[in-house]
């Protein structure tokens, strides 16, 4: 988010910008730990609009921003196994189509044909959008950052923000481990740590860190070194992202292996990203029902990252409530990587005093007080 905002500000001629990152590298927070998924398929109209704009930029990223992002548009397939999910997805597919998204409705056989080796038992329906896909989060972040830098933005790595200085209720500067930066405008792009940065200015930013795991499986044939000759059905050859909506088990091809994960129940906020290996058997129990070949696979590695959750699953984009000069781009609730191109553009327009040509009401910071708008239902 920080790199995208910096890029879009610079494109608007606002180049007196410093991007401050406490780690020695960019994209080591949530961005460096995500599944790379990019989809049009959301339940909330504002999120579908974010996707349309973001995917438009990702499709021409190398030409427009100047960096490769390894974007595979092999589609997202949602599998639905309950009548209520079928009803919800039918309604939302109609909404997506009304906005120009080409989303298909499939039966179980149609879904199974897209993913060789997948068991579609119990599937009552599925949605598929072929322009959805998988991109490289490091590439997108680096692309935005390098292009912003080329336009004059400064990037300070290994520098931690320790405080925000106010004069009355207005931002006056930022305290860092490398000294003070005087400024009238601060963007909180701290991902799962957004609440802490907000608190430095006395602003409530209702974003909680929730741990999510990703596992990588190596195909048994890779392990045996007998590529192509074993009995187990292969992992999908395309990069299609499959989401079993009822269980939230999801997977996609990653290199020669398979990336998979599943939402965890009873989660409580934590900044701890230690891998909980005792969670793996629960995931595998579900996983093998959809992808039996996983029973013979070996898990080559795993990591955990943090979702940055809001109460309604929608982000906060715009000015903070009550603190002039503080802007928020937080709480993307597990789908922020893909929305960073549009979200950064929107906030840059707001800061530059331009009309973003987008109804930001569903993303307003004040909505948690008024409770006036509906959120996102497709949080995986
Ligand atoms: C397991 C997992 C899977 C996911 N899958 C997807 C997916 O398929 N598709 C998708 O779109 N999204 C996905 N997401 C969500 C996505 O990763 C996030 O929404 C997105 O990366 C948020 O970006 P960000 O820039 O806001 O946060 P981050 O990438 O976390 O960046 C925040 C940065 O702020 C820095 N920072 C924090 N505090 C300070 C400080 N005091 N001083 C200086 N720097 C500071 C951090 O070091 C960090 O680099 C997934 C997330 C996880 C955990």
Image: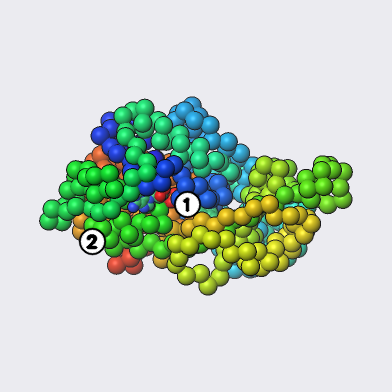
Residue receiving disc 1: 30
Quarter placement of the C terminus = bottom right
Task: Give the secondary structure at mark 2.
Answer: loop
Residue 318 visible in the current orientation: no
Q: Horizontally, is 53 left or right of 215 in the view? A: left
Q: Quadrant of residue 74?
A: top right
What colour scheme does the image use? rainbow
Examine the rendered structure and indicate whether residue 129 appears above or below residue 155. Answer: below
Pick whichever, 307 or 99, lies toward us.
Answer: 307
Task: Give the secondary structure at mark 1.
Answer: helix
Pick whichever, 113 or 22, lies toward us.
Answer: 22
Residue receiving disc 2: 202
Residue furthest bottom in the image: 266
Residue at 57 percent of width and 55 percent of height: 303
Q: Is mark 1 within 8 Å of ligand 1?
A: yes
Pick whichever, 102 or 280, lies toward us.
Answer: 280
Q: Horizontally, is 69 left or right of 232 in the view? A: left
Label 2 Cα neighbours within 10 Å, binned few <14 / some 14-19 / many ≥20: some
Residue at 27 percent of width and 48 percent of height: 176
The percent position of residue 223, horizontal first and vertical second, equals 78, 48
Residue furthest front in the image: 178
Mark before the other along the chain sequence, 1 or 2:
1
Residue at 47 percent of width and 70 percent of height: 268
Quarter placement of the N terminus = top left
Q: Quadrant of residue 282?
A: bottom right
Label 1 Cα neighbours within 10 Å, binned few <14 / some 14-19 / many ≥20: many
Q: Horizontally, is 228 left or right of 136 in the view? A: right
The percent position of residue 374, horizontal first and vertical second, equals 41, 63
The dot on residue 205 is none
């Amino acid at each position: 988010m920080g790199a995208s905002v910096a890029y879009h500000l610079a494109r608007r001629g606002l180049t007196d910008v410093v991007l401050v990152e406490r780690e020695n590298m960019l994209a080591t927070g949530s961005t460096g730990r995500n599944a790379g998924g990019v989809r049009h398929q959301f339940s909330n109209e504002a999120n579908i609009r974010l996707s349309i704009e973001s995917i438009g930029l990702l499709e021409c990223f190398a030409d427009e921003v100047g960096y490769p992002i390894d974007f595979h548009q092999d589609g997202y397939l949602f599998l639905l196994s309950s009548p209520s999910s079928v009803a919800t997805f039918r309604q939302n597919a109609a909404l997506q189509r009304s906005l120009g998204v080409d989303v298909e409705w499939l039966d179980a056989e149609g879904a199974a044909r897209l993913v060789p080796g997948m068991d579609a038992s119990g599937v009552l329906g599925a949605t598929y959008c072929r322009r959805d896909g998988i991109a490289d989060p490091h590439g997108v972040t680096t692309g935005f950052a390098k292009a912003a830098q080329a336009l004059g933005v400064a990037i300070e790595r290994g520098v931690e923000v320790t405080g925000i200085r106010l004069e009355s209720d207005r931002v006056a500067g930022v305290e860092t481990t490398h000294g003070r930066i005087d400024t009238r405008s601060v963007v909180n792009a701290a991902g799962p740590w957004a609440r802490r940065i907000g608190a430095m200015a006395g602003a409530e930013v209702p974003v909680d860190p929730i741990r999510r795991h990703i596992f990588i499986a190596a195909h048994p044939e890779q392990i045996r070194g007998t590529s192509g000759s074993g009995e187990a059905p292969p992992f999908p050859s395309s990069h299609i992202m499959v989401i079993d909506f009822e269980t939230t088990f999801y997977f996609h091809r990653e290199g020669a292996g398979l990336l998979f994960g599943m939402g965890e129940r009873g989660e409580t906020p934590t900044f701890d990203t230690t891998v909980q290996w005792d969670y793996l058997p629960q995931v595998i129990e579900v996983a093998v029902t959809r992808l039996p070949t996983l029973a013979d696979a070996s898990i080559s590695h795993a990591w955990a990252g943090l979702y940055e959750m809001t109460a309604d699953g929608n982000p906060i984009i715009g000015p903070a409530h009550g603190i002039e000069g503080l802007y928020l781009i937080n709480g993307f609730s597990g789908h922020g990587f893909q929305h960073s191109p549009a979200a950064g553009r929107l906030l840059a327009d707001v800061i530059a005093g331009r009309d973003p040509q987008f109804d930001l009401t569903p993303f307003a910071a004040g909505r948690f007080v008024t409770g006036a708008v509906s959120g996102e239902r497709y949080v995986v």
